[in-house]
C-alpha cells in the first residue's frame, strides 16, 4: 500500500444491541447506541476537527476543537463526549463554530514553534492538519510573552525523543500510558500555564522512569513532541506493508512503514485482532537486528570446526551440504540424519523442513524448540480436551471475572496481552497469581493480586491438587456441567482422589510452602467468582511433571465449568512467535501435521500419496536423543533452522559434546550463534521483514507475514530449504509460500479451509478452519469437547528427582525479561541492551546476607551439572531459598547449570527446578573463559580482519 494514516474515528467503537439514527450535516447515519457524535460523523465520511481525541482512548473533551451545534440543544457541545440520540440533527460546520475553532487553534499555535518546514513531522502532524482544517491563516498573539519554546528535549530513550517545546498538553500520551499500556508512568505535572507532561519524578528522564517504551505515547502524540528517532534520521515514510511481529506468541499486527528499502518505523495496526493497535518495546522498536553488521549474508563452509569459515556461493554451499548428507546416509543409514525446525520461522518454512527430513532424509528424526517449551501443553490438552492448543481468543479476557495466572509472567513475556489483562483487572476482575516470584502482576499501579501463592518451585501439581480438594470437598464443583460435558465415572474417580486428606491444603502446605488458608481462599474465589480463566506459561510446562500440571489445570477448568464460552478457558501463553505453528506443522518425531501419530496408517497413506515416498511408522529421535546418539557414534548429521540449541537447551556441556561428535552440522540462521561454533555449513537466513508466509499465535490465530523488503541474503528461508532439497535429489518446485499452505491445507484437517486469499481478505483465521468451522474457531469446545467427553485425569504429585541438600541448598528457576527475547540473538543486537545488558541473579536478602553478598557482586552459580558466574541482584521478589535468572546472554550460559531431568511424558526439560549453591566470585569461571576462547576461534572468517564479535 502507499503511505497514509490509518483511519481515526476519534472515539472507541461501542457495542450495543440498540441502534440509533440521527442526521449529521444532512446525512442520515445509524449507529449503536452510545456512539459519540464525533465517531458517527466519521462513519459518514465527515471529519470534525480534534486534537485530544483518538479512537483507541476514552473520550476526554479537553481540546475544545470538536465543538458542534445540535438542534434543540444549548451551546456548542464537544462531539467527542456527546452521544448520538434518536432523531438528533447535528451541524459540524457553521460560522459560529468556525470562529470558535480558529480562536482555540490560535492559542495552541501561539505557544508552538513555527518550524513546520524543518520539523520531522511535517505533513505527518495532526496539529498542522487541524490548523488547516479550521482555516487558520494567521495568529493574533505574538511570542513576546511567557512561553514554553525554550524547553529542553529529553533524548534519553534510545528509540524516541520527547520535545516539550512542541507539546500542546492534550494528555493523549498520559492517557495512552494509563488506558492502553497500563503502566501509568506519565502524568501531567503542574496546573494551568505550568502544565507539562512528566515521566515520573522531576529528576526522571524517560529512560530512568517507569516507562516501558511500548510506544503507545508516541503513537498517540498528535505533534512531533514524542517521535521516533528513525523518523528524524530517515524522513517520513512513503509506503507501508501490514505484517506480523516475529517476537512472542501474542502475534501483534504491524504496519511496517518504509522509505525506499529502509524501514522507518513499525506502527501497531489497529485492526490487528491479537493486539488491537498496541505494541511492546520489542515489536515496536527492536527490529534493527535485521540490518546489524554481524548478520551473515553469504553462505560459508569448513571441513572441521577448528578451521576458519570460508565464504562461498550458494551453489557451492548447497552442493557441499547435500554431498555430506548423501554420504552419511549411504555410509551410516538414514537414521544417522535429523533436523530441527524453528519456532521463529513461518508455518510454511517449518512444514518444508520436516518434509525435507521425512521425505528427503528418510527419517522421523525431527524435533523443535516448541517441544522444549510447550510439548506438555500438547500432550495434556489433547488427553483431556482432545486438541493440543488453548481454548480462547485474547478478546475473551474482557469477559473474565477471575483470572488465574500460573507459571507465567505476562508483563515481561507477553506484554501486549498483559496490558489487556490489566485493563480488565482495573475494571474489577479478581486475580490469583501462582508463582515462586513476585511478578509485576502481583502488585503494580492500580493492580494487586487478590491471592499470590508463592509456591516452592516444582510443586505445581501439589498446589493445583490442593485447590481441587477445596472445590470438591466444599461442594463448589459445577456438577451440571460435569454430568453434561464430561465422563462422570472418571470425574468421580478423580474427585475421590483429590478429596483424600493427603491432598488437602493443610497436609500439602509444608511441601508447597504456602499458607493453607491462602490456598483455600484462592480455590473458593476461582470456583465462585464467575467466569474463571486460567493462563499459564513455561513455569508450568518446563518441569518433570509438566504434562501432569497441564492436565491438573484442565481438571480444574472442567470441575468449575469454565470451558466453552467467552471469559473462561485454559490458555497457554506461547513463548515464541510461531511455537503453536511449529507444533501444528508436524515438527515432532512422532507426529505429522495436525498432531496425527506417524503410526496411523491412514495418515501415512495421505502423506505418502502427496509426497510420493514411504514414511517410517516408527517415531524418530528427540533432540536429547539425537545428542546421545551422536556421542555414542550413531548420529552423524543435523540440519538446524533458526534455533540455537547450545544456548537454549539444558545441560550445555552435553549439547556441545553431541554437536562436536557429528560429522556435519548445518546451521541455517541470521547470525553465527552459539550452535554455529560447532557447524560445518552455515546457510544465511532471512528475517520476518524479508519473507512471505504465516505465523500462528498462542490463540491459534493464523496471520499473514508479508515481505517488506528483499532478502539481504538473496533467499527467503523456504527457498533455502527447497534448494537444499533439490540438491539432495528431491523434485520440489514451489514458487510461492501460498502453494505450500495449499499443501498444508490438503494434508491437515484443521487447516483445510485456510488459504492466502482468505487470509488477505479477513486478516487472520483461528484454526480449526474446516467444513465444521468454516469461519474459524475463536472459542473451542463450545457445545462439546473435541474428544467427545472431557476426561478427568488423576495427577498425583511426584517430587522431582532434582533435590536440594547441604551442597546445593537453593532452588534456581529461570525466566525472561521484557526487553530481551529468548536467547537474545535479535534483541541483543538492538538498543534494548540499555535496559538489560547482562543476566543477573536475583537472590533474597536473607540468602544474600548469609553469604556476605550485595547487589552488583560477582557470584558463582553452581549445580550438579556445571557452574557459571554472574552479578547478584538482592531483592525480595524471590522467596528465601529461591534464586532466579534469565538466559538471554551467552556470556552467562545459564543452561550450563540446568540438568537433564525432563517431563515424564514429552521429554520437555526441567528448566525451572535446579538445586544450586551461590558463593562469592571474582569473575568468570575457567569454563566460561575456555568457552569464550573456543567461540572466538570458531567465528573466524577467511578474508576478514578478525573473528565475528561474540553474540553480545
Image (cartoon, rainbow, N blue to C red):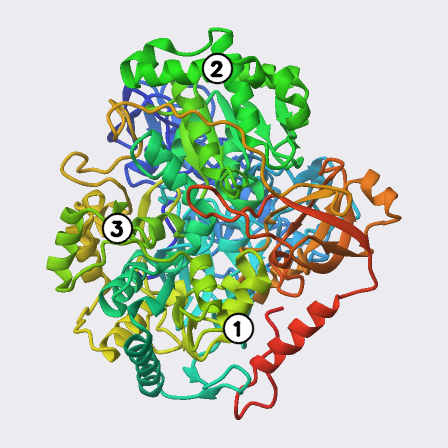
Q: Secondary structure at mark 3?
A: loop
Task: Estimate the x, y position of residue 341 in percent, counting from the top left.
Answer: 37, 60
Are the residues at dot 2 and dot 1 in contact (C-beta closer than 8 Å)?
no
Q: Quadrant of the N terminus?
A: bottom left
In front of the other: label 2 or label 3?
3
**Which numbered disc flags the more N-terminal residue, 1 or 3?**
1
Q: Earlier in the sequence, mark 2 or mark 1?
A: 1
Q: Is residue 345 left or right of residue 884?
A: left
Closer to the observer: label 1 or label 3?
3
Instruction: Find residue 945 and report its horizontal and vertical position in percent.
Output: 60, 90
Indicate the secondary structure of the residue bearing disc 1: loop
Where residue 113 appears, as percent x and y from the top left, is: 62, 57
How many other residues sit within 10 Å of disc 3, few (<14), some (14-19) or many (≥20)? many
Distance of label 1 from label 3 (alpha carbons): 35 Å
**Residue corresponding to mark 3:** 593
Q: Residue at x 75, y 42 (%)?
A: 809
Question: Seen from this angle, which residue lies furthest front?
Answer: 632
Q: Which residue is mark 2?
A: 527
Judge left or right: residue 39 versus residue 879: left
Say whether residue 38 is visible: no
- Residue at point 49% right, 43% down? 416
Residue at the image position 47 percent from the left and 11 percent from the top = 472
Front position in the image: 426 or 565: 565
Spatial CA span between label 2 and label 3: 36 Å
Q: Which residue is label 1 attached to?
A: 292
Disc 2 to disc 1, C-alpha distance: 51 Å
Residue that sits furthest to the bottom in the current view: 943
Callout 1 environment at 10 Å: few (<14), some (14 to 19), or many (20+)?
some
Q: Is residue 141 left or right of residue 687?
A: right
Q: Earlier in the sequence, mark 2 or mark 3?
A: 2
The C terminus is located in which quarter? bottom right
**Along the horizontal axis of the image, is 240 left or right of 303?**
left
Amino acid at each position: 500500500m502507499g503511505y497514509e494514516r490509518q483511519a481515526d474515528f476519534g472515539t472507541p467503537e461501542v457495542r450495543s444491541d440498540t441502534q440509533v439514527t440521527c442526521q449529521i450535516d444532512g446525512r442520515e447515519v445509524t449507529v449503536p447506541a452510545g456512539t459519540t457524535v464525533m465517531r458517527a460523523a466519521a462513519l459518514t465520511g465527515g471529519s470534525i476537527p480534534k486534537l485530544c481525541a483518538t479512537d483507541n482512548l476514552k473520550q476526554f473533551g479537553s481540546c475544545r476543537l470538536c465543538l458542534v451545534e445540535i438542534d434543540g440543544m444549548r451551546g456548542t457541545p464537544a462531539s467527542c463526549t456527546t452521544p448520538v440520540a434518536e432523531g438528533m440533527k447535528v451541524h459540524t460546520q457553521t460560522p459560529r463554530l468556525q470562529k470558535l475553532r480558529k480562536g482555540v487553534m490560535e492559542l495552541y499555535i501561539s505557544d508552538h514553534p513555527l518550524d513546520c518546514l524543518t520539523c520531522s513531522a511535517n505533513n505527518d502532524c495532526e496539529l498542522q492538519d487541524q490548523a488547516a482544517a479550521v482555516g487558520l491563516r494567521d495568529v493574533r498573539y505574538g511570542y513576546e510573552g511567557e512561553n514554553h519554546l525554550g524547553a529542553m528535549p529529553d533524548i534519553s530513550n534510545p528509540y524516541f525523543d520527547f520535545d516539550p517545546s512542541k507539546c500542546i498538553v492534550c494528555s493523549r500520551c498520559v492517557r495512552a500510558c494509563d488506558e492502553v499500556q497500563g503502566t501509568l508512568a506519565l502524568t501531567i505535572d503542574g496546573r494551568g500555564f505550568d502544565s507539562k507532561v512528566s515521566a515520573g519524578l522531576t529528576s526522571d528522564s524517560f529512560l530512568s522512569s517507569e516507562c516501558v517504551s511500548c510506544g503507545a505515547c508516541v503513537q498517540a502524540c498528535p505533534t512531533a513532541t514524542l517521535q521516533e528517532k528513525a523518523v528524524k534520521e530517515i524522513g517520513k515514510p512513503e509506503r507501508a506493508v501490514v505484517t506480523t511481529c516475529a517476537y512472542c506468541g501474542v502475534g501483534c499486527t504491524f504496519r511496517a512503514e518504509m522509505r525506499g528499502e529502509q524501514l522507518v518505523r513499525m506502527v501497531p495496526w489497529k485492526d490487528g485482532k491479537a493486539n488491537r493497535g498496541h505494541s511492546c518495546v520489542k515489536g515496536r522498536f527492536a527490529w534493527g537486528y535485521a540490518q546489524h553488521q554481524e548478520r551473515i549474508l553469504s553462505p560459508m563452509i569448513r571441513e572441521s570446526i577448528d578451521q576458519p569459515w570460508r565464504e562461498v556461493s550458494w551453489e557451492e554451499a548447497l552442493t557441499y551440504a547435500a554431498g555430506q548428507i548423501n554420504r552419511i546416509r549411504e555410509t551410516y543409514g538414514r537414521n544417522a540424519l535429523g533436523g530441527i525446525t524453528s519456532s521463529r520461522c513461518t508455518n510454511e518454512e517449518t512444514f518444508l523442513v520436516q518434509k525435507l527430513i521425512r521425505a528427503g532424509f528418510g527419517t522421523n528424526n525431527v524435533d523443535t524448540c516448541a517441544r522444549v517449551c510447550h510439548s506438555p501443553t500438547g500432550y495434556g490438552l489433547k488427553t483431556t480436551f482432545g486438541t493440543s492448543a488453548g481454548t480462547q481468543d485474547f478478546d475473551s479476557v474482557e469477559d473474565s471475572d477471575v483470572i488465574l495466572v500460573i507459571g507465567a509472567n505476562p508483563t515481561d513475556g507477553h506484554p501486549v496481552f498483559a496490558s489487556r489483562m490489566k485493563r480488565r483487572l482495573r475494571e474489577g476482575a479478581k486475580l490469583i497469581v501462582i508463582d515462586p516470584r513476585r511478578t509485576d502482576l502481583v502488585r503494580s499501579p492500580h493492580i494487586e493480586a487478590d491471592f499470590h501463592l508463592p509456591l516452592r518451585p516444582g510443586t505445581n501439581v501439589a498446589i493445583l491438587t490442593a485447590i481441587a480438594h477445596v472445590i470438591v470437598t466444599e461442594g463448589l464443583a459445577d456438577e451440571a456441567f460435569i454430568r453434561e460435558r464430561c465422563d462422570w465415572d472418571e470425574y468421580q474417580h478423580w474427585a475421590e482422589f483429590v478429596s483424600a486428606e493427603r491432598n488437602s491444603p493443610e497436609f500439602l502446605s509444608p511441601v508447597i510452602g504456602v499458607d493453607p488458608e491462602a490456598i483455600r481462599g484462592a480455590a473458593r474465589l476461582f470456583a465462585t467468582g464467575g467466569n474463571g480463566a486460567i493462563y499459564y506459561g513455561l513455569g508450568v510446562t518446563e518441569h518433570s511433571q509438566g504434562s501432569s500440571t497441564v492436565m491438573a489445570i484442565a481438571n480444574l477448568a472442567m470441575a468449575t465449568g469454565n470451558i466453552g464460552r467467552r471469559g473462561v478457558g485454559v490458555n497457554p501463553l506461547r513463548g515464541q512467535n510461531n511455537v503453536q505453528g511449529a507444533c501444528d506443522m508436524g515438527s515432532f518425531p512422532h507426529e505429522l501435521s495436525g498432531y496425527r501419530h506417524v503410526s496411523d496408517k491412514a495418515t501415512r497413506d495421505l502423506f505418502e500419496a502427496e509426497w510420493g515416498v514411504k514414511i517410517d511408522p516408527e517415531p524418530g529421535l528427540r533432540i536429547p536423543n539425537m545428542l546421545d546418539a551422536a556421542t555414542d557414534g550413531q548420529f552423524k548429521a543435523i540440519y538446524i533452522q533458526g534455533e540455537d540449541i547450545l544456548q537454549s537447551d539444558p545441560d550445555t556441556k552435553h549439547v556441545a559434546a553431541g554437536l562436536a561428535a557429528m560429522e556435519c552440522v548445518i546451521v541455517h540462521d541470521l547470525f553465527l550463534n552459539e550452535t554455529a561454533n560447532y557447524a560445518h555449513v552455515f546457510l544465511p537466513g532471512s528475517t520476518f521483514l524479508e519473507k512471505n508466509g504465516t505465523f500462528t499465535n498462542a490463540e491459534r490465530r493464523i496471520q499473514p507475514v508479508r515481505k517488506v523488503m528483499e532478502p539481504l541474503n538473496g533467499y527467503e528461508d523456504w527457498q533455502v530449504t527447497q534448494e537444499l532439497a533439490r540438491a539432495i535429489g528431491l523434485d520440489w518446485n514451489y514458487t510461492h509460500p501460498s502453494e505450500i499452505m495449499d499443501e498444508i491445507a490438503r494434508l491437515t484437517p484443521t487447516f483445510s479451509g485456510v488459504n492466502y486469499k482468505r487470509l488477505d481478505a479477513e486478516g487472520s483465521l483461528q484454526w480449526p478452519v474446516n467444513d465444521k468451522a468454516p469461519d474459524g474457531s475463536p472459542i473451542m469446545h463450545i457445545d462439546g469437547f473435541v474428544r467427545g467427553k472431557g476426561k478427568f485425569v488423576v495427577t498425583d504429585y511426584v517430587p522431582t528427582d532434582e533435590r536440594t541438600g547441604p551442597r546445593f541448598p537453593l532452588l534456581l528457576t529461570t525466566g525472561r525479561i521484557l526487553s530481551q527475547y529468548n536467547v537474545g540473538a535479535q534483541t541483543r543486537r538492538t538498543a534494548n541492551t540499555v535496559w538489560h545488558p547482562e543476566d543477573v541473579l536475583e537472590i533474597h536478602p536473607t540468602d544474600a546476607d548469609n553469604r556476605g553478598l550485595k547487589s552488583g557482586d560477582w557470584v558463582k552459580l553452581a549445580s550438579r551439572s556445571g557452574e557459571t558466574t554472574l552479578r547478584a541482584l538482592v531483592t525480595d521478589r524471590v522467596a528465601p531459598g529461591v534464586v532466579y535468572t534469565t538466559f538471554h546472554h551467552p556470556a552467562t550460559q545459564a543452561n550450563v547449570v540446568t540438568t537433564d531431568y525432563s517431563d515424564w511424558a514429552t521429554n520437555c526439560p526441567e528448566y525451572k527446578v535446579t538445586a544450586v549453591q551461590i558463593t562469592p566470585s571474582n569473575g568468570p569461571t575457567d569454563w566460561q573463559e575456555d568457552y569464550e576462547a573456543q567461540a572466538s576461534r570458531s567465528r573466524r572468517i577467511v578474508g576478514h580482519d578478525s573473528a565475528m564479535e561474540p553474540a553480545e
